[in-house]
Image (tube, rainbow, N blue to C red):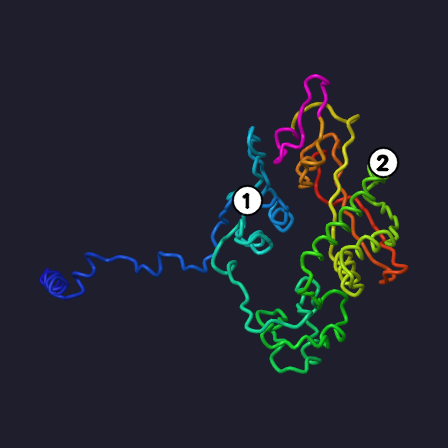
């Protein structure tokens, strides 16, 4: 008994007894640091409805685009909505978001912007991490120490050191992994890009009847000679090297999503009407038919994955410019059915 009393006496008179009575967790353990990657936050007014976030998301049903109601004064706003129950907080949606400021954020790491202390001459060389195979041939070929370096398992060009000699591009074994970006005539480049993309969409649209019934195991191919496009591009910009570079960049990376619509299969279940994030699918009471408005369609594939009767078809088109020439170049178009799961499954 005496030993217990002595223990309590010692406990009471020690200075740490007071700390024990008011014990609490340190703030740095409870408060998340700025770099903590939490669930993505959405700023709807910044969204341009490009769909990059939905395409990059690896978690099914974690993110989708929705559209607010149209008013008499303005069209509805399209923006992404995050489902926290499906989101795995990978941050891919924030990384690929092209808007500035970002529409989606989830930590300070997605707000980092590279600082340029020296502006390159006419061409700025960058490395496409999507295509880079980390062979480091560009690093070995670069005549300027430190202009190309490796950081976080990525090969990076330091624009403040690069002299734009082009040796990295010449030595790279992967087409498109090293890109020379022309920093002049930016607006003209954008105009030419829109010209080419719109022309390719129209060419594919003309083949819709052939694409609609394309099976999962088949590939549909067609060619698009570029003579007329080149003539139009030259009326915008008098620089053949830059025009050819623009054609090559588009065909290297462009992937068009195609949605087809077979009304004969429709059972008017209205599932697609309820799920469409942009309001592109509506029920026409007068004609008793469900219609899709291609101009409002985001090509997000929601209708394709929702419809249990196969009304909506979803296809992907890729492109290759061969030979890489403005005089006799041809864009080879390959179209195949998407591998996304469908409602009928």
Q: SS for tag 2? A: helix
* Mark 2 Cα-neighbour bin, 10 Å: few <14, some 14–19, many ≥20: few
Q: Quadrant of residue 214?
A: top right
Q: Which residue is mark 2?
A: 209
Q: Quadrant of residue 123?
A: bottom right
Q: Is residue 123 left or right of residue 240?
A: left
* Figure quadrant of the C terminus: top right
Q: Nearer the viewer, residue 233 or 253?
A: 233
Q: Which residue is mark 1?
A: 86
- Rendered view: 93 above or below 284: below
Q: Which residue is located at x 70 percent, y 23 percent? A: 268
Q: SS for tag 1? A: loop
Front of the two marks 1 and 2: 2
Q: Magenta stretch: residue 97 in it?
A: no
Q: Nearer the viewer, residue 254 or 77?
A: 77
Q: What residue range appears in magenta?
A: 272-290
């Amino acid at each position: 008994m005496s030993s217990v009393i002595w223990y309590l006496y010692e406990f009471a008179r020690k200075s740490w007894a007071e700390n024990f009575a008011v014990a609490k967790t340190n703030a740095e353990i409870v408060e998340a640091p700025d770099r903590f990657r939490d669930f993505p936050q959405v700023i709807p007014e910044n969204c341009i409805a490009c769909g990059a976030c939905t395409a990059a998301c690896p978690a099914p049903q974690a993110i989708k685009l929705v559209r607010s109601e149209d008013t008499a004064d303005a069209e509805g706003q399209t923006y992404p909505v995050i489902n926290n129950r499906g989101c795995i907080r990978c941050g891919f949606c924030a990384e690929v978001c092209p808007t500035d400021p970002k529409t989606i954020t989830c930590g300070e790491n997605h707000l980092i912007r590279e600082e340029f202390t020296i502006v390159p001459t006419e061409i700025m060389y960058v490395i496409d991490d999507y295509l880079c195979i980390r062979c480091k041939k560009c690093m070995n070929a670069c005549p300027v120490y430190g202009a190309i370096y490796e950081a976080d398992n990525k090969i990076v060009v330091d624009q403040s050191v690069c002299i734009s000699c082009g040796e990295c591009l010449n030595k790279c074994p992967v087409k498109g992994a090293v890109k020379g970006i022309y920093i002049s005539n930016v607006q003209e480049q954008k105009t030419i890009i829109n010209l080419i993309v719109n022309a390719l969409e129209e060419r594919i649209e003309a083949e819709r009847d052939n694409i609609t019934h394309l099976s999962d195991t088949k590939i549909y191919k067609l060619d698009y000679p570029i003579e007329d496009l080149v003539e139009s591009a030259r009326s915008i910009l008098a620089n053949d090297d830059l025009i050819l570079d623009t054609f090559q960049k588009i065909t290297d990376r462009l992937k068009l999503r195609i949605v087809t619509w077979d009304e004969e299969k429709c059972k008017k279940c209205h599932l697609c009407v309820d799920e469409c994030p942009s309001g592109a699918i509506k029920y026409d009471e007068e004609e008793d038919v469900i219609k899709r408005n291609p101009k409002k369609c985001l090509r997000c594939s929601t209708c394709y994955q929702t419809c249990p009767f196969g009304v909506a078809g979803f296809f992907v088109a890729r492109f290759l410019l061969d030979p890489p020439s403005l005089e006799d170049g041809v864009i080879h178009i390959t179209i195949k059915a998407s591998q996304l799961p469908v409602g009928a499954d």
